[in-house]
Amino acid sequence: MGRALFAALFWTLLGVFFSLPSLSAGKGLMSSREEFAWWWSWGLITPFILAFDRRLPFSGKQIRWRILTHLAASLIFTAAYRVVSVAAMAAFGIRPWSALLIPGLFTLWRPNDFLSNWFLCWMIVGVLQAYRYYERYLSSELRLERMERSFSEARLNALRMQLDPHFLFNALNTISSHVERDPKLTRRMIEHLGDLLRMSLESKDRQEIPLAEEMAFLDYYLEIQKIRFGEQLKIEIEVAPEVRYASVPALFIQPLVENAIRHGISHRASGGTVMVSARKLGDQLVIRVQDDGVGLPPNWTLESSPGLGLAVTRERIAGLHPNGESLFSVRRRKNGGTEVEILLPLRVIGEETNGSASA
């Protein structure tokens, strides 16, 4: 219905435009009836041209056959236009209805009139072809965009699948080292691991989750590590209230904390502290994971790091924000230890939709 109204308005505006000379000469609207009869007649013929074009089986390299077919059909459509225009003029009282009879139908139709109308028919065909190829271009662009999006999602899912087993194996190794020494602690670790796996499965189809949900996942992981290290491991967490429901990549803080404990704190006999903070900075979310452990080795670079957790986390963040909207950096702390800083666009999901995050 919308297209029909637009088409009717379009052909009416053409009638108004070509009536302007007679109107400016003071001849009145009655003198414009013939112009409206002509253009409205083309408005009635055009849908049949469009339907004919869509039914043609030629495409691609067969464009020559499409043109030849339209060449023949345009003669028929131009003749049909003559019949429709005479009927319209008869309806407007410009011609008698007897003009629709065969003898009078083409009597007043001079060769120049036929050529001009035939040319106009070809203009309509050309516009339809241009619009048809424009639609094909848009559809190909949309297909390409969907393919790129699917590829990016598949790549992110592959990275996520690569990270989950890495985390699970490390957790199982931690638990297995305590099985014989302290069965009670081992059972508690297994309970927390079960909670971790449940939350991991709940978020497996989501690349991004609220920060509160990510921190709840981290809490379960830290419970396992606190049982393992006891008082040697201290945890400090500071999350600003306004960023609790900011959108963040799922399961991305835990690998960073695991890295800090494994490579920073566990190598010190006295243990150490891991600090996790999240705050708002302008329109960005700043997340820092710091430790006061042994620090980075000499000549260490992020590109040459063999650690899976850092590499995968950086790739996932870059994949979710490919336009340079994010920052991932690892550096030495002045007072010893390591600091990982992540900057993300601040997008708050909404507390009402995330009841599970605070469970």
Image (cartoon, rainbow, N blue to C red):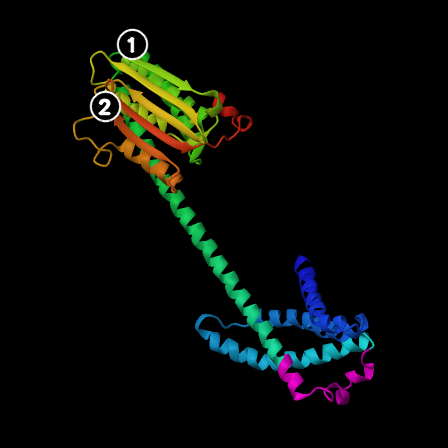
Q: Residue 196 magenta-drawn?
A: no
Of residues 358 and 348, the one nearer the viewer is 348
Q: Residue 103 magenta-drawn?
A: yes
On residue 263, which mark appears? 2
Instruction: Name the magenta segment's main secondary structure.
Output: helix
- Residue 100: x percent and y percent? 77, 83
**Can you tell which quarter of the image residue 343 is in?**
top left
At a point 68% along the width and 70% down the height, the residue shown is 43
**Mark sitting earlier along the chain (1/2):** 1
**Can you tell which quarter of the image residue 295 is in?**
top left
At a point 67% along the width and 82% down the height, the residue shown is 79
The amino acid at mark 1 is: Glu
- Residue 286: x percent and y percent? 39, 27
Up the image or down, 331 lies above or below 118; here it is above
Q: In what quadrant of the picture does the N terminus appear?
A: bottom right
- Residue 261: x percent and y percent? 27, 20
At a point 34% along the width and 40% down the height, the residue shown is 158
- Mark 2: secondary structure: helix
Image: magenta residue range: 94-117
Within-10-Å neighbours for mark 1: few <14, some 14–19, many 20+? few
The amino acid at mark 2 is: His
On residue 291, which mark appears? none
- Mark 1: secondary structure: helix
In the rendered structure, the answer to whether residue 164 lies left or right of residue 61 reads: left
At a point 49% along the width and 58% down the height, the residue shown is 138
Up the image or down, 293 lies above or below 249; here it is above
Cα distance, mark 1 to mark 2? 18 Å
In the rendered structure, the answer to whether residue 260 lies left or right of residue 75 reads: left
On residue 231, which mark appears? 1
